[in-house]
Image (cartoon, rainbow, N blue to C red):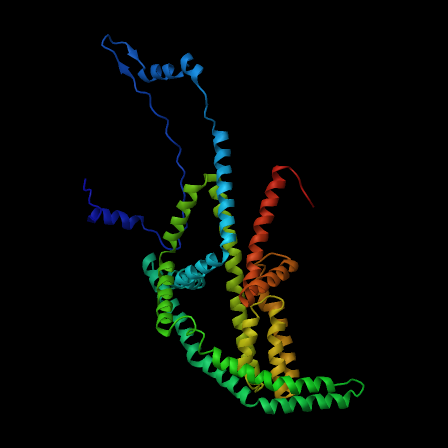
């Protein structure tokens, strides 16, 4: 038999064992075979079990050894000792980290900056994978009738990345310049906007003479020109320096290309990565614990990905719908306002209100009629999103009560800003799911039912 792993026979065998990238990971647990007793025959023809005799000799206690024995090993006490030692080591390390928190945080930031291409690549792969799977299963397998898994996977990945990079190029070429022009136009018209705001408050003071608008007018005249000027200067200065402050242009481009290459590798080898992770889990944990851990990880992953992908698609549709409606009514700055509405819509509950405020303020400066119509349009779009589009796309992807949604938004926004407000909800949903499952298991073990 040929022992060459690169021989044609072994290559055919490896090909037959290859699985598609959508094939599930299969785990087989084998029971240990009982060791066979070896029988030896003596010269006289009498059989004797040598292993049995040696076992009896080992089982016979030696009185001398017993008399001089000072320590008898015990698995229970050994385990307790190991855990206690680990707890002491962890406490010491934690104390060292607290004392040296500044250099530790600097090292962590440095490490995160080094592995940033892998983080960005993982995020891209995270977004791309469901699209690749959908193309593979729904189009290339069912419609095109392609039977080879590798060919289907390659075509799905190629088509998905062409669309993905095409959308990014379109955004860079079309959206960003138009948004920049809108912002520059707003800055140039700041004096006209201040005059219109003054006229608006004067008309309000004529209609409502009992209410004193003079204080508001004075504050507006003092702060609005400076605010608009400063906002314009900040945008002009900050937008070109987003990448140049920390990295130069060449380094940034290299990191982007590296992140895309890493994401392609992750999408292509996602089954091998999942298989390696499964092996690691089973090597560390007991089989029953590993099964439960993998099951909980899958459920958590589905909750997390379901919310992020669904909410991103929902917000994209809302932004496009807002742009078309504003364009039909010939609103100025339609693209800028629609991008704000679509991005802020990714925040549950508070997102629509946060996105509507800049548009209302902007259109109040242009024409109060635009502001009123814009409020009606946003209310109509949000009703459509809340009652039809949202349930159709998201369904009950998080499965948590509104109080936990508000908790996730509040805590995430307080620590991580806009990204925390968006990611706080799925993270809270995962934590609530895991805690509820652990509590239900404990109650079930104690034969307790709470209704």
383 vs 81, nearest the viewer: 81
199 vs 152, nearest the viewer: 199
Going 34% across and 14% down the picture, which residue do you hit? 53
Direction top: furthest residue: 44
State which quarter of the image contains the N terminus: top left
Tell me where residue 29 appears, x and y as whole percent: 41, 38
Res 206 quadrant in image: bottom right
| 359 relative position to 81: left or right | right
Tell me where residue 17 appears, x and y as whole percent: 31, 48
Give above or below for 118 relative to 180: above
| 313 relative position to 164: left or right | right
Q: How many numbered callouts?
A: 0
Give above or below for 52 relative to 366: above
295 vs 427, nearest the viewer: 427
| 245 relative position to 299: left or right | left
Residue 101 visible in the shown view: yes
Give above or below for 122 relative to 284: below
Direction front: furthest residue: 99
Direction right: furthest residue: 210
Residue 368 visible in the shown view: no
Res 241 quadrant in image: bottom left
Going 57% across and 71% down the picture, which residue do you hit? 344
Tell me where residue 349 appears, x and y as whole percent: 63, 67
Going 72% across and 90% down the picture, which residue do you hit? 202
Tell me where residue 300 appears, x and y as whole percent: 52, 53
């Amino acid at each position: 038999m040929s022992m060459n792993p690169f021989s044609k026979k072994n290559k055919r065998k490896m090909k037959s064992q290859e699985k598609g990238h959508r094939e599930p990971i299969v785990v087989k647990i084998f029971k240990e075979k009982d060791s066979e007793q070896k029988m030896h025959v003596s010269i006289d023809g009498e059989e004797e079990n040598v292993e049995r005799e040696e076992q009896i000799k080992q089982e016979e206690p030696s009185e001398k050894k017993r008399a001089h024995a000072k320590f008898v090993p015990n698995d229970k006490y050994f385990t307790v000792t190991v855990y206690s030692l680990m707890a002491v080591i962890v406490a010491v390390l934690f104390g060292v980290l607290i004392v040296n928190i500044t250099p530790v945080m600097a090292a962590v930031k440095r490490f995160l900056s080094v592995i940033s291409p892998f983080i960005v690549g993982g995020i891209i792969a995270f977004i791309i994978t469901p699209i690749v799977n959908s193309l593979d299963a729904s189009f290339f397998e069912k419609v095109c009738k392609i039977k080879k898994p590798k060919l289907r996977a390659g075509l799905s990945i190629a088509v998905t990345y062409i669309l993905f990079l095409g959308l990014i190029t379109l955004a860079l070429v079309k959206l960003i310049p138009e948004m920049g022009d809108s912002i520059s136009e707003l800055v140039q018209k700041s004096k006209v906007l201040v005059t219109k705001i003054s006229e608006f408050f004067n008309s309000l003071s004529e209609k409502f003479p009992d209410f004193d608008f003079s204080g508001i007018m004075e504050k507006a005249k003092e702060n609005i020109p400076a605010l608009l000027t400063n906002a314009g200067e900040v945008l002009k200065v900050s937008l070109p320096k987003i990448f140049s402050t920390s990295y130069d242009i060449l380094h940034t481009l290299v990191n982007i290309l590296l992140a895309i290459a890493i994401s392609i590798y992750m999408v292509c080898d996602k089954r091998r990565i999942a298989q390696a992770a499964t092996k690691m889990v089973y090597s560390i944990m007991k089989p029953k614990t590993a099964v439960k851990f993998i099951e909980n990880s899958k459920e958590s992953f589905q909750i997390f990905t379901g919310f992020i992908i669904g909410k991103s698609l929902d917000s994209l549709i809302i932004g496009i719908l807002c742009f078309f409606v504003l364009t039909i009514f010939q609103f100025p700055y339609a693209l800028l306002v629609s991008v704000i509405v679509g991005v802020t819509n990714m925040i549950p509950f508070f997102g629509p209100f946060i996105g509507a405020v800049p548009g209302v303020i902007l259109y109040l400066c242009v024409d109060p009629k635009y502001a009123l119509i814009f409020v009606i349009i946003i209310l109509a779009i949000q009703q459509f999103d809340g009652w039809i589009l949202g349930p159709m796309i998201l369904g009950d992807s998080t499965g948590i009560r509104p109080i936990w949604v508000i908790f996730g938004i509040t805590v995430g926004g307080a620590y991580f800003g806009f990204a925390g407000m968006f990611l706080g909800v799925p993270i809270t949903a995962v934590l609530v799911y895991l805690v509820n499952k652990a509590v239900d298991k404990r109650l079930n073990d104690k034969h307790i039912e709470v209704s």
